[in-house]
Image (cartoon, grey):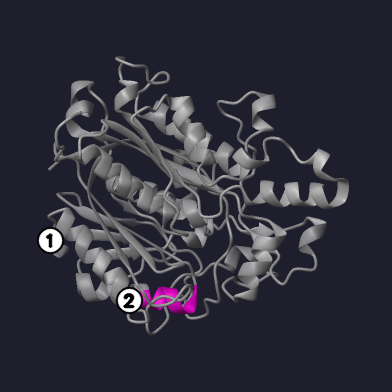
Amino acid sequence: MGGYCDTVVVTGLGAVTPLGADAQSTWKAMLTGHSAAAALTEPWAEPLPVRIAARVRDEPVAGLTRAEARRVDRSGRFALAAALEAWADAGFAGPAEPGGAPDADRVAAVLGSSLGGAASLIAAHEALRERGARHVSPYTIPMTMPNGPAGLVGMKLGARAAVACPVSACATGAESIAEGLELIRRGRADVVAAGGAEAPVTPVIIAGFAAMQAMSRRNDDPARASRPFDRDRDGFVLAEGAAVLILESAEHAARRGARVYCELAGAGVSADAFHMTAPEPAGRGMAQALRRALQDARTDPAGVVHVGAHATSTPQGDLAESLAIRGVLGERGYCVSATKSTTGHLLGAAGALAAAATVLMLHERTAPPTANLDALAPEIALDVVGAEPRPLPRGPAAALSDAAGFGGHNVVLAFRDPPIRR
């Protein structure tokens, strides 16, 4: 076992999203401010009250044979593609091996999913109902387990230190990264692949969210449906995909001469203890997570230049989060971006994708735009980046990435420039 680690850095990024097949293409598309949302054209969507979503264009099969791909849920395929990209981006050529570089006994995988293999479970139920038990796949259980993507990634990367799967609704991806941070800090791992994956675009899930009135019903204008912080926001746009960050102890990264994007300086976690699906109206839970992230990172609020907001485009959620941000960080000195306006809401993968965007924002000093912000809602007293990317000043800086989930989960990740740049 290693000793306590003071500094954890990000050395690799991977993503599969409606905007792009990898992290860099996703980032470049995000900077254009164009939404990936589109109309659902499948016959099953026609009777639904919501008929829009943001979907991944090409089916990823990285790391899997054709036969293996048929035995893995879509969320697992997303997770593996993102993890393999991040692994390679970090400079690792192949799976970890005992005693190798990296040492498999010091590598962990922490990947969560909000709903697991929901599509596979629905397909198995339909097969049982229509054709009988003999037609239910023997792979149904591993395909539907929420920890399926984590297990798959752990096996492919050779992660023997730990494989874990947090499940905290739409805060899952961010909580996975927070857990990865702690694994390295406590000396249980040197390298962690952390993130989230989701493949929720199914009739039942869309109907369920629609019944809650959580989703936008702009069926005739999908690209303008997700509009965080806008006066006319009316709900989120469902999306799918995955994002993975490679976290590493600074010592391990320096020893192998790794490129470092930034430091993951801290994390703050809290719970609203208020309502299963609605945020605490004043944003007290999110404010607590923000304060805890800053305290954990030993960072003054004045050093924060950017906040990647959770901002799903719901009337209540966006307002509560804005109150929390303003209450903790004050009125000026930072700007806020809401990237779900372009990507849609990836549920359990959303926090991981937001974290990846924050890493790239710090690395490139560019704040991504918030699409469809025609008129900032008068109750949102924040400096929200509008339709164009905004250059950010050079010099020592920190940035925060927010995530929240049904059940009252709040997670905030604090990133800052790598030690060498500071």
Secondary structure of the residue carrying tag 1 is: loop
User: In which quadrant will I find the C terminus?
Assistant: top left
Q: Which amino acid does label 2 sit on?
A: Gly
Q: Residue 134: where, in percent of width, then height?
A: 82, 38
Q: Residue 294: where, in percent of width, then height?
A: 18, 59
Q: Depth check: 293 or 277 in front?
A: 277
> Residue at 31% of width from left, 77% of height from top?
323
> Residue at 51% of width from left, 68% of height from top?
372
The magenta region covers 314-320
Indicate yes or no whether the magenta region holds residue 393.
no
Which residue was labeled with disc 1? 300
- When the figure is inspected, residue 40 is found, relative to residue 316, above or below; the finding is above
> Residue at 74% of width from left, 68% of height from top?
48
Q: As drawn, is 354 to the left or to the right of 115? A: left
- When the figure is inspected, residue 281 is found, relative to residue 139, above or below; the finding is below
Estimate the spatial distance between the alpha carbons at disc 1 and disc 2, rounded to whole Å: 20 Å
Q: Residue 53: where, in percent of width, then height?
A: 63, 59
Within 10 Å of disc 1 (Cα), the crowding (few <14, some 14-19, many 20+) is few
Which residue was labeled with disc 2? 283
Q: Can residue 331 be seen in this view?
A: no
Q: Which residue lies furthest to the right in this view?
A: 131
Magenta stretch secondary structure, dominant: helix
> Residue at 65% of width from left, 31% of height from top?
69
Q: Is residue 348 visible?
A: yes
